Amino acid sequence: MERGIAALTARLTLLAVEEDGMSTAEYAIGTIAAAAFGAVLYSVVTGDSIVTALTNIIDKALNTAV
């Protein structure tokens, strides 16, 4: 019985000390960072130079003789 209590105490101590996962504040910061990254990526991809470059690549691929 004493061995079981010691094992349970050790496990509970380990769970209290472990830092696996994220807390609510970390989730909030991660979500904001992901949204900001998405906004920057969207603005880059929809920029004129990227759209022109992708259009040229697609036109070149479609007009290539096989």
Image: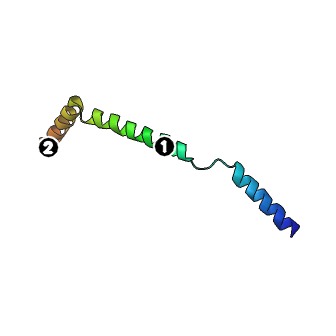
Q: Residue at x 68, y 49 (%)?
A: 18
The image quadrant that residue 6 belongs to is bottom right
| Mark 1 residue crowding within 10 angstroms, few (<14) / some (14–19) / many (20+) | few
- Look at the picture and state if 11 lies above or below 21: below
The amino acid pointed to by label 2 is: Leu
SS under mark 1? helix
Of mark 1 and mark 2, the one earlier in the sequence is 1
The image quadrant that residue 55 belongs to is top left
Q: How is the image coloured?
A: rainbow
Q: Is residue 23 left or right of residue 12?
A: left
Q: Residue at x 20, y 35 (%)?
A: 51
Residue 58, percent across and down? 18, 40
Residue 26, percent across and down? 53, 43
How far, Cα to Cα, is label 1 from label 2? 45 Å
Q: Is residue 36 left or right of residue 66?
A: right
Q: Residue at x 82, y 64 (%)?
A: 5
Q: Which residue was labeled with disc 2?
A: 62
Of 56 and 66, which appears nearest the observer? 56
